[in-house]
Amino acid sequence: MTQHDNEHSKYSIAVSKVTKTVSTGEGKLQILQPISFNVQHGESIAIVGASGSGKSTLLGLLAGLDETSSGEIHIEESPLHTMNEEQRARLRGEKVGFIFQSFMLVQSLTALENVMLPAQIAGLDDPARKAKIILEQVGLSHRAYHFPNQLSGGEQQRVAIARAFIGEPSILFADEPTGNLDAANSTKVEDLLFTLNRDKGTTLVLVTHDDELALKCDRQLRMNAGVLQEITANAEEVA
Amino acid sequence: MVLDLAWRLFRHEARRGELTIILFAIILSVSAVLSLSLFSERLQAALVDRSAAFMAADSQLRSREGFNDDWEQAGITEGLSTARQASTRSMLFGEQAMSLVDLRAVSETYPLKGDIKVMDKPFGKISVTQDTPSDGNVWLDSRLFQLLDVSLGDTVFIGDKAFVVEKVLGEIPDAGFAFFGSDPIALMPLSDLEATKITGEGSRVNYKTYFAGESNLISSYFDWLKPQLDDEIHSWRSLEDDDSPIGESVATAEQYFLLASLLAIVLAAVSIAVAAQRYSRRHYDPVAIMKTLGASTSVIRKVYVLQVTFIMLLGIAVGLVVGFVTQHIVVLALANSVDVSLSVWHWRPVAIATFTGALCAFMFSIYPLLQLFSIPPLRVLRRDIDSNLSAKWLQFAAAGGAIFALMWAYSGELLISAIMFASGIALVASLIGVTYILIFVGRKLGQGSMGPWQLAWARIKRRSMDNSVQLISFSVTIMLLLVVLVMRNDMISQWQDQLPAGTPNYFMMNITEDEKQTLTQHFTDNHVDMGYLYPVVRGRFVSINGEQINTKVNDNDEDDSESEGRDGLGREANLTWDLELHNENKIVDGEWHKDWVNPNTDELTLYPVSVEKDLAQRLSLELGDELTFNIGSEIVHSRITSFREVNWQSMQPNFFFILHPQALKEFTPVYLTSFYLAAERREDLTTLLSPFPTVNLFDVESRINQLRAVVDQVSLAVEFILVLVLIAGSLVLVAQVQASMDERQQELAILRTLGAKGSLIRQSVIFEFVIIGVVAGLMAAIGNELTLLLLQTKVFQMQASLHLNYWLIASVSGAAVVGVLGAISCWRLLSLNTTTLLRKMI
């Protein structure tokens, strides 16, 4: 292991000079200026910012859903920036969980089957049993055989949370997890998310508009026109 | 794991109705192909039976040298039924007169197919009999009663043996269509033939052994028999050799069925393509989710290929049941009016339908599936990201390849397949062009305030690529329906034109020069229209370019029943002369001799002769060949100046040879004519003909009726095939509208949410579909013309014509049908409340 690698092993996520440029009809557009930051194991960070500031783009890069234009990202010591889509998929399957604003449940699978899905994909033993346990934890065992369109928004998001935790991921990415929910449901989902996160020692990266939610995280980073700033204590710019 | 996941997805989606459209498309394709091909096989089996009736068997072994007991026995052992007939031309002697007859000596089992019909009196009422003449009895054609002046119960002589005239022979199955110029038939028992002593050395007797049975038994028997046959002596005839008018009508109908089935396949393919695209789109999110959750492309691939396999298997299974039930209902409904063989159960249609379902499901899913596999996981964050696969050519290649392969594999006819395929390609190409023009025009129109028209145009404009795909599928569907409809109309009307009401049903031969005038007058007085009087001399065609006609040509001498062509040759031919070319004749090569001028040199005069083209082909004649005829003791030399195509099915007098009038001016002709007499005036025949005892009358009424019956039956069958294809096509249209409504759902939901009135949305959707329907209908009409032109001239050998009325019909009905279907789907959507609509979008 080189010193450089050792450096990365300290962090759950290590981001170094990452940029993202896209081609548009009028030429190239840099949507992320060079960004560098690290996230400790078990730490929770919130990325806040206005719509179009680039926070979802950053989330996509961190989660290996998209490719960087330049720079390096290490996830649990794995160099994401050198991997192809297949390798990144495998890494996601092993290390990463997701929660989305629009829940992203497979409409033609029941709540239970949605929760089982990552375990099935990863080839884990007895996915149904695991899924039932975790559905129990999110308080939805009585809804196990309902389809997503038979569940309320809050219930769907709790299913999504259960699905995110079934593979016991090291890192959880949440994209506006309460964006589509009313206040009561939001609170329920937030509580669940942070509780599970704490209990399982997961690193949490949360993208949100909601400053209140962001404040529940250990650190807050603000995205503004493709530039990322640390807004905790000393408000140091991390880019 | 993958299997479990695929199965769960399949099960839930099927239960929730998510797979309805694609399942429906596969069911439709399989059931349409199965019902059409099963129905057409059953119909063909029935028609083949009918054709068999014109041969009195499924196959005939003809011999010039007696029957072969061993061969017949081998046939019986094989499981075939057999019968025998010896036929020859012979003199039949009455007390007062004698006549040359077409003598048929038959065994008791004759005929194996079809019926012998008898009449209660000469030219009387006809009825079927199961008997054959018993020993010592003979059944005579109506004409012979007239010619020989005999009555039932009288004694006549054939060779050395006396026979009692027992019955009036109406018809026998294999009398052939060479009624004109043939001799009247006398039917006698085969067991009496030897006693007549007419079959001795030098006599020309044709021995037919008939075989009937399962076609595979017959072919295996023929395989065994073939090496033992001597081509000089034997010939084998089966239904495929049937070039009678019946055989030709059946052949045309079969091609039509083939065409209809091909079109059904294409329709099915189009619907599968539409459904597969829709299926793929609906799975973009699940694929993105699964990829996000760590599924590799190979896992995704396996899950979806398995899903498509499940869908396909279910679709094929249900399709087979639906198809079988559908055709069975049609068959039962038709049982009284159309002769359909119920006993046939061919595995071929089942295999074809299964193969079609499987091939279509996979080939048409390839591109949508590849698109699906290529969905990036990032779609979970950015919902606007679609597939990044842009290989439209692959879609066209897979779809086109599959359709063409199916067409070709199924029809075995490269030409029909190529024509249909090429017009399809041309249509698709021009449609893409039209879509863009339309969008360009629409851009100008679509500005201004937001009325329903503007909304409709705006949508068409925005969804140009989707709309072009939709337009293509609508146009192809409408075009295929048009092709089937117009082909059926043209074909049936051309069949009916062959035998219009008033088609001559009697022929008169042997009218002398002296009788010509009085006969014409007599008929006019009795209000019977007589046709043109053709002068005829009988002559023997003896040499080609000075070379005596060899035995090869004479092989056909006695081969005298089914084919007009062979009949006129070998023995004396009817020669006529004319300066005018009559309707049923068309010069196909050379020039008609109207303007020929006799050079009047000292050299031998070669008079122009026009020869029927099939005969010319058979005898390898060429323009300019010198033909010699022996008429009485005179020789007439002639040179071929033209070849004619003759419509033998027209029931008009036709001739192999038409000479220039000068060639035969020295000869005294007899005249030949035809007339029509309504069935209820049959009794008048005696009045009409009694003043002319030497005139021979030929009754072809029953032959015409046979022909009409077949044409009617085939026409009715064609109608039902048309209805089946129309139903299939309409279902495809419904599927297409349904699929495209889905794509509009989101937009409608937004408009609804923004407070757009239901009427505005509904009208805009209707207008949008009406615009697409009009254009699709119009394009279909153009495609239809092109396809028909090629099909009718290259495949069906029919007269091609423009069908301008269909341009209007297609556009109006296209607009109406597509508009109404759109309105219905839209109404269904608008009946949901906005929340449900929005929820459905997620």
Image (cartoon, coloured by chain):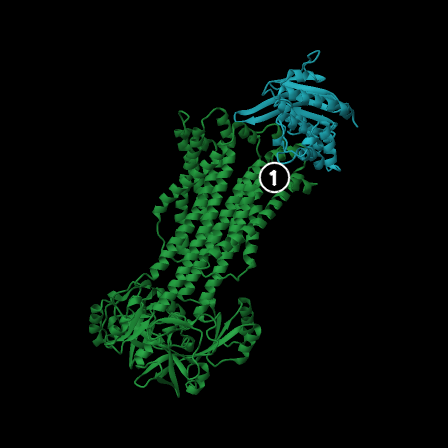
Q: Colour of chain B?
A: green
Q: Amino acid at mark 1?
A: Glu
Q: Which chain is cyan?
A: A
B156 lies above or below B781:
below
Residue B548 occupies quadrant: bottom left
Percent position of residue B48, x then y: 47, 64
Q: Residue at x 43, y 62 (%)?
A: B250
Give the class, few, some or many, for how many residues have Cα within 10 Å of label 1's Cα (few <14, many ≥20).
Answer: some
Q: Quadrant of the N terminus of chain A?
A: top right
Residue matched to label 1: B13
B374 lies above or below B595:
above
The front one of B634 and B739 is: B739
The front one of B121 and B583 is: B121
Chain letter of mark 1 equals B
Percent position of residue A43, x then y: 74, 20
Outermost residue toward the bottom? B160
Residue B104 occupies quadrant: bottom left
Answer yes or no: is residue B554 visible.
yes
Percent position of residue B541, x then y: 34, 76
B599 lies left or right of A75: left
Outermost residue toward the top? A234
Percent position of residue B34, x then y: 53, 53
Answer yes or no: is residue B619 visible.
no
Residue A177 occupies quadrant: top right
Count of numbered badges drawn on the protein: 1
The front one of B330 and B230 is: B330
* Secondary structure category for the residue under label 1: helix
The front one of B616 and B219 is: B219
Q: Quadrant of the C terminus of chain A?
A: top right
Outermost residue toward the right? A1
A111 lies left or right of B199: right
